[in-house]
Image (spheres, rainbow, N blue to C red):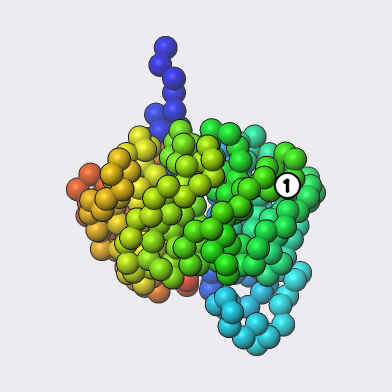
Amino acid sequence: MPLLTSASIFASTSDYLIYVSDERSGDIAVIDPAEAKVVATIPVGKRPRGIHCSPDGEHIYVALSGSPRVAPGVDRDRTVADKNADGIGVVDARNRTVRMKLPAGSDPEQFAILKDGKRAVISNEDKGTASVVDLATGNVLGQVKVSDEPEGVAVNPANGLVYVTCEDRGDVYVIDPDRLFSPANLKVGQRPRSAAFLPDGSRAYVPSEADGSIAVIDTAVNKVVSNIKLGGAPMNCVASLDGKELYVSTGRGNSIVVIGTAENTVLSTIPVGQRVWGFALSPDGGTIYTANGVSNDVSVVDVKTRKETSRIKVGDGPWGVAVGKRP
């Protein structure tokens, strides 16, 4: 019997939902892809950004922050941070309410759920740390010191090690979430915003917004082996299910760039909404859903034809996108 992947288990639009975190309006927009519209809005708290679903689709996890919106190195004292607002909101996907808020260190922005599905690694942007949290109990299991302005978090699907990108100094820290230490760190471009791995874990890609580049990293030795020059402001990236392509959001470039991973060359540029940041693939890999932070909508992109097919209005300041199995 062939192995059933997540794509084969829920490949139809009737099998999954799309969740979009709206940073400024403090909610999650729930999109039904079969109807191509928002079917619910869930208030969750201050500045929801990073967002993920549990494997069974029963829970949505979203990073919340009471720290003011401010760029790195810019006036940090404009507004007093509300630390009581910080945490990971746990949303019941069936009744669409917040069940609890897990402690997550200071100013959580992005996070990743580990391979066991029971823990998360969270970047604490204003403290220069990464926290490991038990998703069932809310216990902070430990913190690992990284450098200033940690942001992107990604888990290597092969070995479970975590990459944390740090904007201020252009660092990537490798985190061992079991032993709670960093076995390696490396330099990439200026303001690295996220990281993504090939499905086999052999390569990682780190887009650096300020110098318009993507570092290609050999994960066996944690070394940059190539640099893809894009120009613009690459923000987030996701690999295709077969690992042959990398999709990159360009922020104020208002597009998704498609890169062939065999030669590290640009294959296509797809116009989408304004200030595209987070995005996600459908379970079958055929559709991209983008969070467009200025136009306040989600672009629906057909991967095969390289075209935006529609847009769906959401809340104010869409930031992240997660695709989850219908509960």
User: Which secondary structure, mark 1?
Assistant: strand
Which image quarter is the C terminus in? top right
Q: Which residue is more in the foreground, 164 or 106?
A: 164
Q: Is residue 243 above or below residue 316?
A: above
Q: Position of residue 99 (x, y in %)?
A: 70, 53
Q: Position of residue 155 (x, y in %)?
A: 56, 43
Horizontal side of 260 relative to 208 (left or right) equals left
Which image quarter is the N terminus in? top left
Q: Please report the residue visible at 63 percent of the width from the left and 48 percent of the height from the top.
A: 184
Based on the displayed image, in which of its 4 quarters is residue 104 positioned? bottom right
Instruction: Report whether residue 120 is seen.
Output: no
Q: Please report the residue visible at 39 percent of the width from the left and 44 percent of the height from the top.
A: 239
Disc 1 residue crowd, few under 14, some 14–19, many 20+, Cα 10 Å:
some
Instruction: Report whether residue 133 is seen.
Output: yes
Horizontal side of 252 relative to 305 (left or right) equals right
Q: Please report the residue visible at 23 percent of the width from the left and 44 percent of the height from the top.
A: 304
Based on the displayed image, in which of its 4 quarters is residue 313 positioned? bottom left
Q: Is residue 139 above or below residue 208?
A: above
Horizontal side of 126 relative to 16 (left or right) equals right
Which residue lies under the disc numbered 1? 181
Q: Please report the residue visible at 68 percent of the width from the left and 48 percent of the height from the top.
A: 182
* Amino acid type indicated by mark 1: Phe
